[in-house]
Image: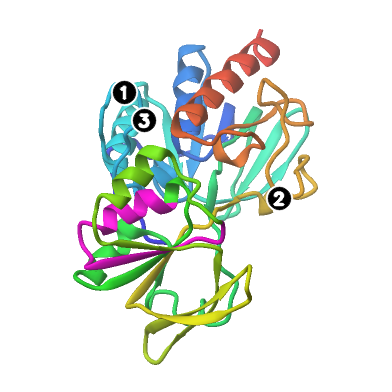
């Protein structure tokens, strides 16, 4: 997945061996936790492997963040990063490859460096699910995409499919509607599941068709994708859809591979926590989209960050 370049946040490679709080992930949950940590008189370190804002950077328009009737994901990411910078939050670009629980938690970076903290907050978010069908890997980057804001411009005045019917799918479809000639939404359920406002807006584009009760069975093409083999899940009928590209938005996978057997995960890989966002290991918290919960929104991610840090400051720093 491609990412936009945002450079407003303060980054450092001059790292100490120990901090009060280590926050893995610089999305809205992690950034919020870092700001609350500074306000609590603690010294946090944010470790972000891509860039601050996380998945927000791949969202064209955000309309449910209080204070802004509409703001781009890149702009909101930058404002959050600037807020952290104003509070002198230390941020480093690296990937955490392992975690060692204990009285002092240890994180191991991809460069081999080990850093310790009394409290660890996991805010690693999630990444888009793939279809898992023949041809998907072959045509990834050659017609298959998981980010409309990254790749939409390649399909100007073309016919594209959007696979999925939830909020993310329709958000991306609305972005594509400004660029492409035609959109076909392929949904495996009898109806769309996105918010009614998004459904209304996508129908009003006048260039969107809908295919329900249908899954993608195979991605086909020559040098690049040129058709999708579709299967109706009720009738088993198979048809081919000629398209120039396909954007896949069928859900997310939590970024928890490095945490197996370290903290308790549910069957889908999300981290199980209590109401204070603390895991089954004392002093290790999980916030944002990587946590098992019902609602995954920017505002709930930020709330998680505040809840976790405030709980940690009372339990482990007083």
Observer-side mark, 1 or 2, equals 2
Tags 1 and 2 touching, CB below 8 Å = no
Q: Could you say which is closer to the camera, residue 268 or residue 30?
A: 268
Tell whether 92 sits left or right of 121.
left
Q: Which residues are magenta?
A: 169-189
Extreme residue toward the bottom, this view? 222
Observer-side mark, 3 or 1, equals 3
Q: CA distance from mark 3 to mark 1?
A: 24 Å
Q: Which residue is mark 3?
A: 64
Q: Which residue is mark 1?
A: 86
Q: CA distance from mark 1 to mark 2?
A: 37 Å
Label placed on residue 39: none
Magenta span has 240?
Answer: no
Q: Could you say which is closer to the camera, residue 263 or residue 270?
A: 270
Tell me, yes or no, if residue 277 can be seen here: yes
Query: Helix or strand or loop: what does disc 2 sit on?
Result: loop
Q: Residue at x 44, y 22 (%)?
A: 35
Q: Which residue is mark 2?
A: 268
Query: Which quadrant of the view contains residue 246?
Result: bottom left
User: Residue 159's x, y, as percent?
Assistant: 29, 72
- Mark before the other along the chain sequence, 2 or 3: 3
């Amino acid at each position: 997945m491609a990412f936009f370049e945002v450079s407003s946040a303060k980054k450092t490679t001059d790292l100490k061996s120990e901090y009060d709080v280590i926050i893995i992930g610089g999305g809205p949950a992690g950034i919020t936790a870092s700001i609350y940590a500074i306000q609590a008189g603690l010294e946090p370190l944010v470790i972000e492997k891509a860039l601050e804002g996380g998945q927000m950077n791949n969202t064209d328009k955000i309309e449910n963040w209080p204070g802004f009737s509409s703001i781009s994901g890149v702009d909101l990411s930058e404002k959050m990063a600037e807020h952290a910078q104003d509070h002198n939050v230390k941020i480093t670009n690296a990937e955490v490859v392992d975690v060692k629980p204990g009285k002092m938690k240890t994180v191991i970076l991809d460069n081999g460096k080990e850093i310790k903290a009394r409290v660890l907050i996991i805010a690693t978010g999630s990444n888009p699910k793939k279809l898992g069908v023949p041809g998907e890997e072959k045509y990834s980057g050659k017609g298959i995409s998981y980010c409309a804001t990254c790749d939409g411009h390649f399909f100007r005045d073309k016919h594209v499919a959007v696979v999925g019917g939830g909020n993310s799918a329709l958000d991306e479809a609305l972005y594509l509607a400004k660029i492409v000639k035609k959109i076909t939404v392929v949904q495996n359920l009898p109806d769309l599941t996105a918010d009614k406002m998004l459904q209304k807006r996508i129908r009003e584009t006048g260039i969107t068709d809908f295919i329900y009760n249908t899954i993608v069975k195979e991605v086909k093409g020559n040098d690049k994708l040129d058709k999708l083999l579709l299967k109706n899940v009720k009738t088993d009928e198979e048809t081919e859809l000629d398209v120039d590209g396909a954007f896949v938005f069928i859900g997310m996978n939590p970024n928890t591979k490095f945490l197996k057997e370290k903290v308790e995960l549910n069957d889908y890989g999300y981290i199980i926590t209590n109401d204070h966002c603390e895991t089954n290991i004392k002093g290790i918290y999980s916030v944002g989209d990587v946590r098992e919960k019902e609602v995954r929104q920017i505002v709930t991610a930020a709330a998680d960050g505040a809840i976790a840090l405030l709980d940690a400051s009372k339990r482990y720093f007083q």
